[in-house]
Amino acid sequence: MQSHAPSLVPTPERVAALDRLGDEIAVLSAHLDAATARLLDLIREFDARGGWNSGFRSCAAWLSWRVGLDLGAARERVRVARALGTLPLLAEALARGELSYAKVRALTRVATPETEARLLGVGRAGTAAHVERIVRGWRRVDRRAEARECALRHRNRALRVYQDEDGMVVVRGRLEPEIGALLMQALAAARETLYQRARVADGESGRGHVSEETSSLAQKQADALALLAETALHHELDPGGPGERYQVVVHVDAPVLADPEQPGQSVLEDGARVFAETSQRLACDASRVVMRHDEAGRVVEIGARTRTIPPALRRALLHRDRGCRFPGCGVRVGQGHHLQHWAQGGPTTLSNLATLCRRHHRAVHEEGFQVARGPDGALRFRWPDGRALPEVPVPAAVPGDPVGALRACHDAQGLRLTARTACPTWLGEGLNVGWAIDVLHPLAQNARPWGSSEGEG
């Protein structure tokens, strides 16, 4: 038994109709790419001006909430938008519909102002698949160059400590960037500690800051290094147990915890003042120790340490909320927030709790955002000015003929797009990626062994 697939005999009318349909697809795609260029311009400006910094963790998080993009796609839009700010040739080609967004997205992964022109040629000559292969090869060369530079830095790290003829100890060294940054931060902290000690000592003796006026920066650095060494030896190079190492202790008066407007203390263990709203946030989900003082301020009673949110209740809270409940967030790890603070009489119950990530917990306590549970049990968020912050924003208005409106907008800008605007100049020949990278990449000859090549595609 034989089966025959139906055959369609192309007629001139059918061929012409399909050609027109294909041209319409190509023209509309060019219009969409040109519109995407404008969208990326707006995203870049919005990001630079911090328009997203109104309760959202990033511009990508705002895009995900506001226009419904997947968070990964939103991050990629922001990345490409930022990159095009320094790549005017690629930005212009996208705005004129000459390059697709897919090609531009790939090229911005490797393009720099110095290599932009030659990579633009790659985008115009090849298909999207060609561009992706060239970019992958380009990145391999970049990674090899970076790996060689990183290995060279690591090999060149050194610290020499020796005694000079006059008995002074000389310290000379070269550190990797991240280790050097760590050392500079530690020295800065030690200098500040020494400065504060000198202020206290001079204040008690009634002298001016004599030592501060006569010490040069180099001398202060030497004193700071000595303090670091003494501190390390004093602690026997042991930072302590994890529980104690990362513990932050806040002392706050009960009236202040209930009402930030009330007078009273709100300080860290070392006496540094923190805002009462910050203390409220920290107390929402922390261990609590009640201390009672007499009229002279002496401690007369210390209660046992208790968890504000018991472990069983926390498990139920995490199971119910599945992450931060702030609109558009969704971070899986969060903190328990009392809708009515326990210091104001609010109960520590599941109905009075909501999970918020660290960023949005701060937004609610210190930045004026509001959250409450409605009669139906749903959470209601509000902006600091009282406007409702919806879980899903109202969709933007769309004209009845969006394609016609897009074409009219581009016509008004003098942008003439045809079915051939974005066509590559490729004529069907094979692509030798190795040869192409050798020709295009400024570091390729040094990065690849002589004579090595990629297979043709």
Image (cartoon, rainbow, N blue to C red):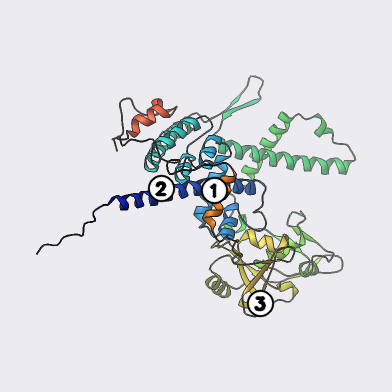
Q: Which residue is mark 2?
A: 23
Query: Around disc 2, counting alpha carbons within 10 Å, would you say few (fewer than 14), some (14 to 19), or many (20 or more)?
Result: some
What secondary structure is found at the residue carrying circle 2?
A: helix
Instruction: Describe residue 351's horizontal placement relative to residue 211 as left or right.
Output: left
Residue 453 lies, in percent from the top left, at: 31, 31
Q: Nearer the viewer, residue 51 or 280?
A: 51
Q: Which residue is mark 1?
A: 35
Instruction: Describe residue 153's horizontal placement relative to residue 170 as left or right.
Output: left
Quarter assignment of residue 203? top right
What secondary structure is found at the residue carrying circle 3?
A: loop
Q: What kind of residue is marked 2?
A: Asp
Residue 347 lies, in percent from the top left, at: 68, 77
CB atoms of marks 3 and 2 within 8 Å: no
Q: Which mark is residue 396?
A: none
Quarter assignment of residue 141? top left
Which residue extends farthest top?
165
What secondary structure is found at the residue carrying circle 1?
A: helix
Query: Around disc 1, counting alpha carbons within 10 Å, would you say few (fewer than 14), some (14 to 19), or many (20 or more)?
Result: many
Q: Work out whether mark 3 precedes mark 2 in sequence or the reverse, and give the earlier one.
A: 2
Q: What kind of residue is marked 1?
A: Ala
Residue at 64% in and 61% down: 360
Mark 2–mark 1 Cα distance, whole angstroms, equals 18 Å
Residue 27 lies, in percent from the top left, at: 45, 47
Residue at 74% in and 72% down: 343
Q: Which mark is residue 374?
A: 3
